[in-house]
Image (spheres, rainbow, N blue to C red):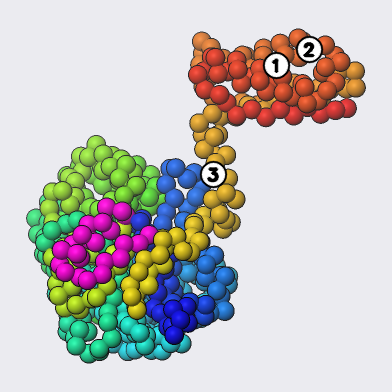
Amino acid sequence: MAKNQRDELVFVPLGGVGEIGMNMAAYGFGPERSRKWIVVDCGVSFGGPELPGIELIMANPEFLEENADDVLALILTHSHEDHYGAVLDLWPVFDKPVYATPFTAAMLAAKRAGDGIVENVDISIMRPGKAFQVGPFTIEPINVAHSIPESNALLITTPVGRALHTGDWKLDPTPVLSAPTDFDRLQSLRNDSELPLALVCDSTNAMKEGESPSEQEIGENLEKLILDAPHRVCVTTFASNVGRVVSIVRAAHKAGREVVLSGRSLHRIMGIARELGMLEGIPTLHDQDMYRSIPRDKCVLICTGSQGEARAAIARIARGDHPVIDLNAGDRMIFSSWAIPGNEREVIDIQNLLIDKGVELITANDALVHVTGHPRRGELKKLYSWVKPEVLVPVHGEAMHLAAHAKLGRAEGIPNVCEARNGDMVRLFPEPLTMPAEVRVGELYLDGLVLCTPDESGVKGRRRLSFGGMIIVSMAVNNNGQVVSGPDIVIEGLPETDEESIGELVHDTVHGVINSMPPKRRRDTEILNSALFKGIRGEVNAFWGRKPNVSIFVHRV
């Protein structure tokens, strides 16, 4: 059989490989020209200062749209934003089912209701250990421990081979609330089929030696810190880490304290957990309105804002503009989290404000109060030994994480280590091979309510405005070249001091240019426009050292 007619299992990362966040991948099966596709995860990353006005970034699904008739389904490993946050923006156009656990499905429904999203998707519930069929793919969710309930790896089986897509995971034997990673099932994979197996695996902590601490250890340390606190205790953590929140609640209960929640996302996610029966036996959680009625030494506050979000509860508390909650000198503040790369400055600013208030600050640098939900090198080695992959594809990480993971896989004797980036196509079976830049990939920005490509967005113009400000000049000129109205001048974003005025400089420059030109030349709108533009830019640059953005409007009357 010709190579282009044989069945193949291929993997195509569309986002999340070479970067943290925006995870989206496709698996294809069949001959080269007639493959069927499933998609795993559909996440976002967040715009930073370099993308003014951009809230969310997601993978451009152009490749999937080109093959829409052959795209069969989307399967979600879990409900962190970087894995499911783009579903309601990107998936409705495909009109194909989304497979998700009950918790992830409830999170999607809450996101749709909370954000007022009209579009919807068809959800099919999946459960760990219950395999289901999607076209030529058999998919089995396998429970893994992570920092959110109901996280799953996916065993994807086809006639030519299998892929274990780990999603986000760790080998935590004692998680809080959620079931532990299914060691038995993972260990059985090497023996329950003669089909070769490829491991498509999380690389986030591939540079860290050893094994990740357990959530149970975090809970024990939080219990000690809450028990010996003399006054209030405030804890901020990721709202989606339901197990961590439960650890804090249990620790507060043991210390004889009441728990107050502050932050919409906390209330929403804990409400979902309660509806799904995850909070049986958990003590009452109070709304923030109860905060002032609880004695200072009997209160534990759990609040949002661990990533420095300006409108979240802890940021408002730190600034002193929260309508209900304040912290006083001697209170204890625990950051049971770490700053996602890019958020460090905002988090540090909040911590500094709290320190200035006299609040005692405890972070992961001071005590074991946080651990990520990703595997370190020791855990990766264990997984290799259990599943004995013939192929390793490191994913979910920046270049340094992927390279460290690939090097570890080779050192552990995995026969084929395929290093890939977004847009590459990796043939897993038969004959593993990485084909660089095989698929068009890119990004989409959520700019307010508008989903657009980077070129379609206004980011470049906003950057220019943020650097050079704006000068607008408007005037009316008649057919004789006489200025009959204006010039009206608007200046935004340029420095203005008591001693020297850019406004006066621009005013003098405009009048100087106009007066230097004979009426005949002023009648030519293009010449007048160009002369004003060059004159203003040149004079302001000489004064300020920067070239401003200049717009000239000459109206002919």
Numbered mark located on residue 459 in the image: 3
Residue 439 seen in the figure: yes
Whether the magenta-drawn stretch holds residue 415 is answered as: yes
Q: Work out whether mark 2 precedes mark 1 in sequence or the reverse, and give the earlier one.
A: 1
- For label 1, the residue is 510
- Per the model, the C-alpha gap separating discs 3 and 2 is 37 Å
Name the amino acid type tagged 1.
Answer: Val
Specify start and end residues of the magenta stretch as a single range.
398-421
Observer-nearest of 531 and 243: 531
In space, the residues marked 2 and 1 are separated at their CA atoms by 11 Å
Q: Which mark is residue 517?
A: 2
Q: Secondary structure at mark 1?
A: helix
Q: Residue at x 34, y 89 (%)?
A: 131
Disc 1 to disc 3, C-alpha distance = 30 Å
In front: 399, or 526? Answer: 399
Locate residue 84, reporting x and y percent.
41, 68
Mark 2 or mark 1, which is nearer to you?
Answer: 2
| Residue at x 20%, y 52% (from the top left corner) | 334
**Residue for point 37% across, 88% down:** 159
